Image (spheres, rainbow, N blue to C red):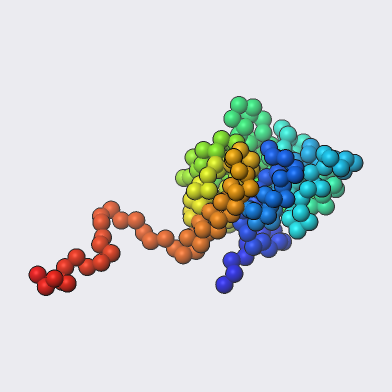
Amino acid sequence: MKDVFSIGKKKLSGRLFIGSGKYRDSLIKNIVSASGAEVITVALRRVDINSKKDNILKFIPKNVHIMPNTSGARTASEAVQIARIAREITRSNWVKIEIITDNKYLFPDNAATVEATRVLAREGFEVFPYINGDLITAKELVRSGAAAVMPLGAAIGTNKGLRAKDIIEILINEIPLPVIVDAGLGKPSHAAEAMEMGAAGCLLNTAIASAENPVLMAEAFKLAVESGRKAFLAGPGQTSKFASASSPLTGFLKL
């Protein structure tokens, strides 16, 4: 049976989303191909429809769904404005809400994110809010009409992995929306671990962009996400406090 990822009004065959920042535009096509990603996030500031050189949309394959993000927004109203402009330019009603007022750790502003999500969902957007993992915020996002919840694994750009593992697991178990782990994942093993927990998908950028071979790393993350998803569907065996032999220890020597 094919494992189809239904999110919003779209069906995806893959569960790895990628960002488009931090690497050359000319690499995007190869990274999309290697990662198998069907969704790519794009910052509005990288879109210039009047330029052939500085318009990132020229480098994104036609079969890839564009998810504009509100990078640079510091308030809910700024995020809403960016989302509306992005929809006009990209013709995509998907938007990643990213509102950051913390300049040191770059943690998202959860309250402003809920506010922007509520407004944009009413306007017909499929809203993907990026949050600092918190169950109460996640429940508010469900009520506000979000298409998914996207908690950070660790501080953005750090490549530290699932530092927020416990809260992400709570969200997976308690929220009736797809939970997509966004930010902080640095190695394919981090993505596999998130998927084994039951995350619906992973979104990453820095881990690929900062690799010595970004294209090869993109492929590695693709395989890790697929492997973790299959492990989750297979139902991993329970852990045990005591050892248990996989084969009988007595009887075959007739002792």
Q: Residue at x 63, y 29 (%)?
A: 102
Q: Give the vertical position of 131 relative to 125 (above or below).
A: above
Q: Residue at x 76, y 50 (%)?
A: 60
Q: Give the vertical position of 94 relative to 208 (above or below).
A: below
Q: Give the vertical position of 144 relative to 226 (above or below).
A: above
Q: Which of the 4 quarters of the picture holds residue 204?
A: top right
Q: Residue at x 65, y 51 (%)?
A: 17
Q: Is residue 21 left or right of residue 172?
A: right
Q: Position of residue 206 (x, y in %)?
A: 62, 40
Q: Position of residue 53 (x, y in %)?
A: 84, 40
Q: Residue at x 88, y 40 (%)?
A: 51
Q: Is residue 11 left or right of residue 236?
A: right
Location of the N terminus by quadrant is bottom right
Q: Which of the 4 quarters of the picture holds residue 43?
A: top right
Is residue 153 at least partly visible in the picture?
no
Location of the C terminus by quadrant is bottom left
Q: Position of residue 110 (x, y in %)?
A: 63, 38
Q: Position of residue 229 (x, y in %)?
A: 53, 59
Is residue 227 at least partly visible in the picture?
yes
